Amino acid sequence: MKPKQKKMIKTTLIYAALVLVTLFFLLPLIWILRTSLVTKAQAYQIPPDFSAKFTLDNYRAIFQHSDFGKYFMNSAIVSLTSTVLSVFFGSMSSYWLSRKHGDSTKEKLTILATQMIPPIVLVIPISTIIKTAGLNDTLIALVVAYLTFNLPYVIWMLLGFFEGIPKELDEAAEIDGCNKFQTYFHVVFPLVAPGLMATAVYSFLVGWNEFMFALVLTGNKTRTMPVAIASLETQQGIQIAELCAATIVAILPVVLLSSFIKKYLINGLTFGSVK
């Protein structure tokens, strides 16, 4: 067999494997989308009717017959707020640790140790503190709870990015008359922007998908999307069509955010390579 034919066969097998892996992950999402676009009766039909006409009735139902719009906004507010606060304070903490004179191993190990604590262990003490502070059933309670496990992760993740930036840049900026804040925001911050965005995406996803704290700390008014989706399991059974519609609504912001961040990361990684 000629080398060209071997290469063609190898390439074909690689692409075939990639297609199979892609279908493995995409088919459940495609099925959820299909179920969200059929009637309730057709959603339960076995075998499924692939000739069924699509309708948006399930999407109208979750927004008209329940407060899904409010729950969506609650998730967005809590996730964005906790992400902004985590990245803001976490980035400055990471910058300080990376530029600290002397050994900072103890601080790093302490931050890493907080990630070894299962979140379920923190539910009771955090809920007790929140109740004592009078913040129960408020969005502020969720933001505070999410900061407890988001902030250490952000600090730990960003340490690698800050440590990869030469300290000579800081010294050069100080020689030019910049103070610490100016050095951070005008010199170091643009260089770690891709890392900040990647960390922010993870932080947002954690807040957007978090269920346990949202279930314990929220009520009917402050309920988030994961809790609202779980409530579609009623005494009459699972409202499968509306459940799939709610799932698609919950996935869309993540897909849009990922598309935006992907473009930003590529621009950030290639920025400055050509002048």
Image (cartoon, helix red, strand yellow):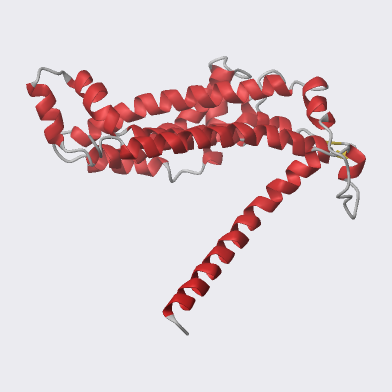
**Which of these two is toward me, 106 or 229?**
229
**Which of these two is toward me, 158 or 16?**
16
Residue at 60% of width from left, 17% of height from top?
A: 138
Residue at 23% of width from left, 40% of height from top?
A: 163
Residue at 55% of width from left, 63% of height from top?
A: 15
Q: Is residue 55 left or right of residue 269?
A: right
- The answer to which image quadrant residue 166 occupies is top left
**Which of these two is toward me, 215 or 271?**
271
Q: What residue occupies the far bottom of the structure in this picture?
A: 1
Q: Is residue 61 left or right of residue 102?
A: right
Please identify the quadrant where the C terminus is shown.
top left
From the top left corner, tell me how far across and down residue 8 is, in percent.
50, 72
Q: Is residue 28 above or below residue 200?
A: below
From the top left corner, tell me how far across and down residue 116 is, in percent.
43, 46
Q: Is residue 194 something that shows in the picture?
A: yes
Residue at 22% of width from left, 36% of height from top?
A: 98
Q: Is residue 88 above or below residue 43?
A: above
From the top left corner, tell me how far across and down residue 28 is, in percent.
70, 50
